[in-house]
Amino acid sequence: MYRFLLSRRWLVFHLVAVLLIPSFIQLGIWQYHRHEQRVARNELLSANLEATPLPVAELAGDGEVADGERWRSVTATGRYDREHEVVARHRTDADGDVGFYVITPLVLSDGSAVLVNRGWVDSPADPTAHPEVPAAPEGEVTVTGRLRQSETQANSGIRDRSGLPERQVMRINSDELGADLPYPLLTGYVEAVSTDPEPAESPAPVEEPDHTGIGSHFAYAIQWWMFAAGVPIGWFVLIRREARERAGGGRNADGGPARAPGPPAPTGPSPRSSAGDSPRPTAPAEGPAGEPPRPAALSAPRGDAG
């Protein structure tokens, strides 16, 4: 009854089903891991953003900013170096408009400096022109902000480019920008939240990162696992349906549609004998009234001459 399962068509179907089940399971695991990463990121962001600000020099030394210190609230006190200010290209604001981030070194009291992202400004009509940037405040200021790691292609996806207009960069990277500065630069940079004293005019502040939403990764994981569970169920249903169709004459053993039965073939001799057959007796002829029937005469075989 189930010999059709060994046909070529069904063997291909079995192979596809066997491959789909582990694939769907792995896709679900991948989405669940992304969910866990998003939850862990939100917890880290929430803790670091709400923490009491620390001096930036305690967290951004000679080495890279630790993963656990990303977005940590920090403070830095010093004087802005307007001469070495640059802008980072292709940055968006809260409304999705493309512009620049304004990056200004803040020279600390010990002679070192830290890069400060003062905020966002709009792009000029001429893409090669320098944007209009509110001047950094003069004198000593205290900046409170979020500590960030230097941008690299690996952690930001931003590729560096050569031939950019003067004082424009693609990435905010302390190692790359520090090579042209006359003082040592702390690693990473600070994303400014507030400045004391507050300047009369400043770039639009960078929005705080979202740390509440978890996305749809968990729902996608459940969806993939449901697909994995549905494959064997669908496989069983199709086999049962095929078996019922075959049991009811719906298909032949080769998988094709069954042919409708025709009328039975004749099994007796042909009503007409061929030439050379033995003579057949004829019914006795009746004689005149009152006489017994005459003996039947043998008829000559058909096909005899004369």
Image (cartoon, rainbow, N blue to C red):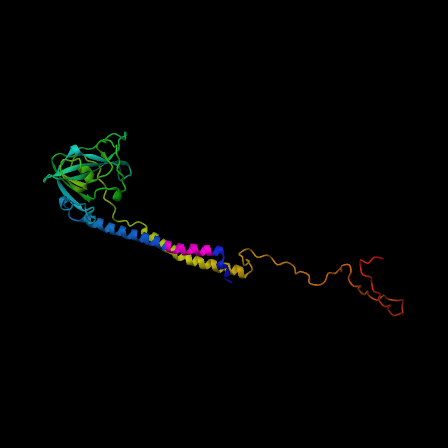
Left/right placement of residue 280 relative to residue 105 reads right
Image quadrant of residue 104?
Answer: top left
Find the magenta span and give its range: 11-23
Per the picture, the main secondary structure of the magenta-coloured stretch is: helix
Residue plotted at (39% across, 56% down): 21
Which quarter of the figure has residue 139? top left
Q: State left or right for residue 37 relative to residue 225.
A: left
Q: Which quarter of the rendering shows the C terminus?
A: bottom right
Name above or below for residue 124 compared with residue 172: above
Q: Can residue 241 be seen in this view?
A: no
Q: Does the magenta stretch include residue 20?
A: yes
Residue 106, x across and y down, in percent: 15, 38
User: Does the magenta segment cover residue 158?
Assistant: no
Residue 183 vs residue 224, the one in the foreground: 183
Whether residue 244 can be seen here: yes
Q: Which residue is drawn at 17% across and 41% down?
A: 194
**Percent coordinates x, y for residue 109 in the rendering:** 10, 39
Q: Which sits in the foreground, 242 or 137? A: 242
Residue 227: % across, % down: 39, 55
Out of 289 and 251, give the one closest to the viewer.
251
Q: Position of residue 141 (x, y in %)?
A: 13, 38
Q: Judge whether 174 appears above or below 286 on screen.
A: above
Q: Which residue is drawn at 47% across and 56% down?
A: 10
Note whether 104 is above or below 73 in the view shown.
above
Residue 208: quadrant of the picture: top left
Exactly how many numbered labels are in the figure? 0
The furthest residue to the left: 110
